[in-house]
């Protein structure tokens, strides 16, 4: 996180003689902030780095691109290397504590042997953190007779080793979930249950799910899925020597990587069983999002289940978190980041006041553990406090309900031990005197109150940001860095006057846009039972023509400006549904494509009835117009999103839409923050191209 005050002050001074951190007091002359005149500096005790010795974490990392007999992947090895780099640089894990198997090193026998090596490694003390990561192909197979798979017709999941082969007499089987579960259970018996497992792979579905649709002529997309169809016939006693053994008291080998009530480890999976994990040349979408979150928030404050809510939404993927201990801190808080800061805290008039606030990235819901002084950091804490009131440069903390008061004889140190509310948008803003109005606008935003205040964070690393802001003559330039956009085309840029009154609405509007874009509500039944079709319409705009353009969780098409499009939704769930559909345009406009009718106090007709009901938008009886696609000058690719909210009763979402903050008709209206109790939410990217791909 970036300290706004330090950035702003350093623009005006080249002196660093003082050992204190110098920040700015924005409340001089009331709440007014002088945009270009340097305010009076105020000395505040500096944040104190927390001593961090070498991490006790041990890791097994597996990444496979080059399969002997299957389609190759592009990003699995990159994922493995990125995870290793994060462990070494981010968590201070020594190279000798990380076992890496890449490509040909990751044979079936080598993978199984590596699990056994972890189980029997004398260096690993009981309850020390163990991290297991796999990136590569995943698959599904019919269960051999006698294997429990969760019911008749259900499939078992498999990890696919590099040397997998089906040639008669030279078979190398995939590694079934039963074997993986037994290997992890063996590690847990010897080393305890502080085991974190991350799989960036998927479970193959039917052939029709993975086949290329030949009718879609703009069909070459830069991502691919980590799944293959297997013809492997598993034998009943495969790996019996591994899974048929005496297990620990109360444990059993359950079917599936995702195991309810699991106590041996916590699993983070890239997607649900009905979805496919995707990658591009840079790596897996899930691994990229996971590492970005871990680097930004710090795993010492991150609860496993928080990952599902705090990562940016991944197109077509709903990550899963399973395990009995999914609500504890990553690695049971025994593998903190290499770089952590604590903040001075003192007791004033019976209030705990910490010398860090909005400008330091403090947010509502955060928790802090208090230590007497620097020498006692990470030993015995005085107590735990939670955020009560956040100010620009300080925070009032309070005791959790039912906890006893503790005294502070002198200023102590507070170390954040639980993250607060997720930000709506992450920005990268370089240190530049021309960008002082941006920092002033951010300070004004931070001083706002109420539930509609947007949460904006600054990040040092642009790769962790949604947008970057730069100066250009008398303008401020907003550039898109979001990988969900830049994966398909160049970054888009937008300009506003270098004035607080123009910058502040743009900040609020872009934060609102990302708040809506990142809303997620995973529901397996919605994924499986609600069918969405996007089709071209005939010249009369009354009938759909051609194939379903919504394929492989995206719409990817070449723009024909005269062509109109419509959407058909089929509801095969047992519930009546009320869908609301928005377009999130590339200029940060949010427009309504469909919303249910209202009936006041009278009974409302259900627009999408249960058990086979359909709703056609843009044609048919719904009465909503079709949509068309177009490209602006200077861009050959445009990425926009369709967001669908499914509720079981009418919900008024009319406060979500907004005009573009960068258009000629931009105004000062900022939509209120809308909390939506949705049964399910679907996000569809629309990739619009000027030319077909080859």
Image (tube, helix red, strand yellow):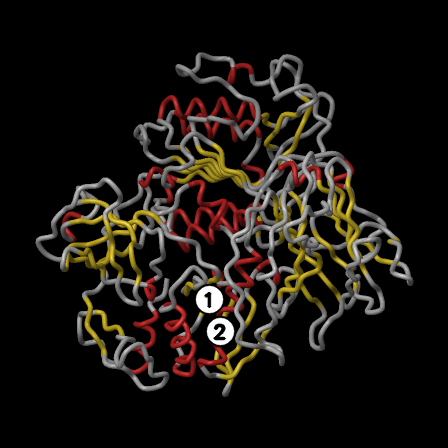
Q: In which quadrant will I find the C terminus? A: bottom right
Dot 1 crowding, Cα within 10 Å, few <14, some 14–19, many 20+:
many
Asked where in the image residue 457 lies, by quadrant, the reply is bottom left
Q: Position of residue 619 (x, y in %)?
A: 83, 56
Name the residue located 73 percent from the left edge and 63 percent from the top edge.
688
- The front one of 330 and 184 is 330
Q: Position of residue 182 (x, y in %)?
A: 49, 22
Q: Nearer the N terminus, badge 1 or badge 2?
A: 1
What residue does disc 2 label? 469
Tell me the element at label 1: strand
What residue does disc 1 label? 427
- The front one of 93 and 355 is 355
Label disc, if present, on residue 69 of the rendered structure = none
Asked where in the image residue 521 lies, by quadrant, the reply is top right
Q: Position of residue 640 (x, y in %)?
A: 66, 62
Left-right relation of 600 to 416: right
Q: Is residue 347 above or below residue 335?
A: below
Q: In which quadrant will I find the N terminus? A: bottom left
- Circles 1 and 2, Cβ within 8 Å, touching? The answer is yes
Dot 2 crowding, Cα within 10 Å, few <14, some 14–19, many 20+:
some
Asked where in the image residue 439 lies, by quadrant, the reply is bottom left
Left-right relation of 572 to 676: right
Q: Position of residue 471 (x, y in %)?
A: 48, 81
In this view, the residue farthest toward the left is: 409
Name the residue located 81 percent from the left edge and 50 percent from the top edge.
548
Q: Is residue 169 above or below residue 326?
A: above
Tell me the element at label 2: strand
Name the residue located 44 percent from the left edge and 23 percent from the top edge.
185
Residue 92 visible to the viewer: no
Q: Count the labels in the image.
A: 2
Marks 1/2: CA–CA distance: 7 Å
């Amino acid at each position: 996180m970036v300290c706004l005050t330090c950035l702003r002050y350093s623009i005006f001074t080249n002196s660093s003689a003082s050992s204190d951190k110098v920040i700015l007091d924005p409340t001089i002359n009331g709440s007014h902030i002088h945009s270009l005149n340097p305010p009076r500096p105020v000395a505040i005790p500096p944040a104190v780095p927390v001593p961090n010795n070498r991490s006790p974490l041990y890791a097994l990392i597996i990444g496979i691109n080059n399969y002997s007999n299957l389609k190759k992947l592009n990003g699995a090895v990159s994922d493995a290397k990125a995870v290793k780099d994060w462990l070494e640089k981010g968590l201070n894990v020594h190279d000798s504590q990380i076992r890496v198997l890449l490509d040909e090193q990751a044979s079936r026998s080598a993978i199984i042997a590596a699990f056994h090596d972890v189980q029997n490694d004398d260096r690993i003390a009981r309850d020390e953190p163990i991290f297991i990561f796999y990136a590569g192909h995943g698959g599904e197979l019919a269960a051999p007779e006698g294997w429990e798979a969760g019911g008749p017709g259900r499939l078992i999941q498999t990890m696919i080793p590099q040397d997998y082969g089906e040639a008669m007499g030279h078979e190398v089987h995939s590694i079934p979930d039963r074997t993986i579960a037994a290997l992890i259970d063996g590690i847990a018996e010897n080393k305890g249950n502080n085991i974190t497992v991350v799989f960036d792979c998927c479970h193959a579905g039917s052939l029709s799910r993975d086949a290329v649709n030949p009718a879609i002529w703009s069909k070459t997309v830069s991502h691919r899925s980590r799944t293959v169809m297997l013809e492997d016939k598993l034998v009943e006693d495969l790996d019996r020597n591994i899974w048929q053994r005496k297990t620990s008291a109360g444990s059993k080998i359950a079917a599936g990587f995702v195991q309810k009530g699991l106590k041996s480890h916590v699993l983070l999976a890239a997607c649900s069983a009905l979805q496919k994990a995707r990658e591009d040349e840079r790596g897996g979408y899930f691994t990229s999002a996971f590492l970005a979150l871990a680097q930004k928030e710090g795993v010492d404050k991150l609860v496993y289940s928080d990952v599902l809510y705090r990562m940016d939404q991944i197109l077509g993927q709903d990550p899963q978190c399973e395990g009995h201990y999914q609500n504890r801190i990553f690695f049971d808080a025994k593998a903190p980041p290499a770089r952590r800061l604590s903040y001075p805290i003192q007791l004033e008039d019976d209030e705990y006041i910490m010398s860090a606030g909005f400008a330091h990235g403090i947010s509502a819901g955060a928790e802090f553990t208090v230590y007497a002084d620097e020498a006692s950091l990470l030993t015995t804490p005085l107590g735990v406090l939670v955020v009560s009131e956040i100010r620009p440069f300080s925070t009032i903390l309070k005791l959790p309900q039912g906890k006893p008061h503790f005294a502070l004889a002198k200023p102590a140190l507070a170390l954040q031990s639980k993250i607060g509310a997720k930000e709506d948008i992450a920005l990268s803003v370089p240190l530049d005197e021309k960008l002082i109005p941006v920092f002033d606008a951010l300070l004004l935003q931070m001083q706002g109150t109420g539930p509609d205040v947007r949460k904006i964070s600054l990040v040092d690393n642009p790769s962790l940001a949604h947008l970057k802001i730069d100066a250009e003559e008398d303008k401020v330039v907003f550039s898109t860095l979001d990988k969900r956009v830049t994966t398909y085309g160049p970054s888009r840029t937008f300009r506003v006057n270098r004035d607080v009154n123009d910058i502040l609405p743009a900040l609020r509007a872009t934060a609102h846009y990302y708040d809506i874009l990142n809303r997620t509500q995973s529901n397996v039944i919605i994924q499986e039972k609600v069918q969405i079709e996007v089709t071209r319409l005939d010249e009369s705009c009354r009938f759909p023509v051609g194939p379903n353009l919504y394929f492989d969780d995206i719409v990817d098409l070449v723009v024909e400006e005269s062509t109109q499009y419509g959407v058909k939704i089929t509801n095969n769930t047992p519930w009546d549904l009320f869908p609301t559909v928005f377009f999130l345009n590339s200029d940060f406009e949010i427009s309504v494509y469909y919303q249910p009718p209202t009936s006041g106090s009278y009974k409302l007709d259900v627009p999408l009835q249960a058990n086979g009901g359909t709703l056609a938008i843009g044609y048919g009886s719904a009465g909503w117009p079709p949509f068309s696609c177009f490209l602006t000058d200077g861009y050959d690719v445009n990425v926009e999103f369709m967001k669908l909210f499914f509720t079981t009763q009418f919900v008024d979402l009319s406060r979500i839409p907004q005009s573009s903050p960068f258009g000629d008709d931009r105004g000062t209206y900022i939509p209120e923050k809308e909390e939506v109790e949705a049964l399910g939410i679907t996000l569809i990217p629309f990739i619009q191209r000027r030319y077909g791909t080859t």
